[in-house]
Image: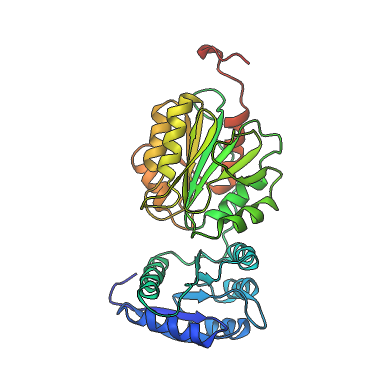
Amino acid sequence: MNQAKRIKVLVVDDSPTMVNTMATLLTQDARIEVVGRAGDGNRAVSLARLLRPDVITMDLLLPGLDGPAAIAAIMADAPARILVVSAVADRGADLGFQAIRAGALELIAKPNVTSGEELRRWGRELVNSVCLMAEVPVISRRSRREFIPPPPSTGGRVDIFGLVASTGGPPALAEIFSRLPKDLPVPIVVAQHITEGFTPGMVRWLSQVTPLGVTIAREGERLEPGKVYFPLDGHDLFIERGIARLSRTRGGPCPSGDLLLTSLARMYSSRAGGGVLTGMGDDGARGLLDIRRAGGLTCAQDELTSVVFGMPKAALDIGATEQPMPLSALPEFIRQCCTKPFDRARGDGS
């Protein structure tokens, strides 16, 4: 986006106090202009059509149309970049992933305070999120491309597969997991960047769309085939000898994709598989390169089907994988990696 052009933001929340607070925090940054305010879903849809904002901050528990329904209507008629700003509670978290499915890009939690330094710190995070969202191409709905993935070119069957994702990741993961078989013979481990508090809701949501078991890993738990493991909120996940290990995240992306994938390369060597999906930044690229250097199998989502191509591009730029693949091809590629016959030349014998 042209830096001289201010970012037009529509703020949607049923609390006038919250609307005013967010508008004040946002307009303290000279790059941002709040062009509209709405207290219900129907008004949000009307203003989105009228004002064509660059970014919409959207609450979920709204009068009239709730957040997910309003987002679906906006994405159908007046597509915009939508940032969900919602309280972290069971219903809020579940609605959050309905909102993601409808087209929202990110989830952030509302602050627990209404004044003071903590609120100002949250405001800076909100401003940063809005400015980052403004750089994301607006997407209504992409059509799928038919694409047959090439068979994994080297190595035998993998014993574990790791995935890293950020912006746009939850619907991409849903697409992948919904098309993998229940009897997948290996575990899948995931580092999805997400605001603390929303992981349980994401796990519940993904559990509804896949035959695989989706769970939050417990410290010291032995990984099982046919299951998908996410780290506990605010923690990194890494693997030691088939056992889940958790550590509190210390700065950087949360959870760390590089840490997860590098642990797979170290523990499984050529029997590790990994992929980097849509997202901002470069997390996961170095870990994916470690897997490839160890002889494992790697992939990255392509630009056309990524909401943000930053992370896959970073992986491709350093040679961590051979070619990008559309999202529709990734489930079959992963299935092949996890079920292909062992390589007899390496003594694996099928």
Q: Position of residue 254 (x, y in %)?
A: 44, 52
Q: How many dots with numbers? A: 0
Q: Is residue 147 shown left or right of residue 121?
A: right
Q: Residue furthest left?
A: 4
Q: Nearer the viewer, residue 215 or 265?
A: 215
Colour basis: rainbow
Asked if residue 169 shows in the view, the reply is yes
In percent of the image, x 42 and y 83: which residue is there? 23
Q: Quadrant of the C terminus?
A: top right
Q: Is residue 143 shown left or right of residue 310?
A: right
Q: Nearer the viewer, residue 302 or 250?
A: 250
Asked if residue 321 shows in the view, the reply is no
Asked if 180 appears above or below 78 in the picture, the reply is above
Q: Position of residue 180 (x, y in %)?
A: 66, 41
Quarter occupied by residue 9: bottom left
Q: Position of residue 229 (x, y in %)?
A: 58, 43
Quarter occupied by residue 32: bottom left
Quarter occupied by residue 70: bottom right
Q: Nearer the viewer, residue 93 or 285?
A: 93
Q: Quadrant of the N terminus?
A: bottom left
In percent of the image, x 46 and y 27: which residue is there? 267
Q: Nearer the viewer, residue 325 or 156?
A: 156
Asked if 173 appears above or below 272 in the picture, the reply is below
Q: Position of residue 205 (x, y in %)?
A: 65, 56
In percent of the image, x 54 and y 30: which residue is there? 242
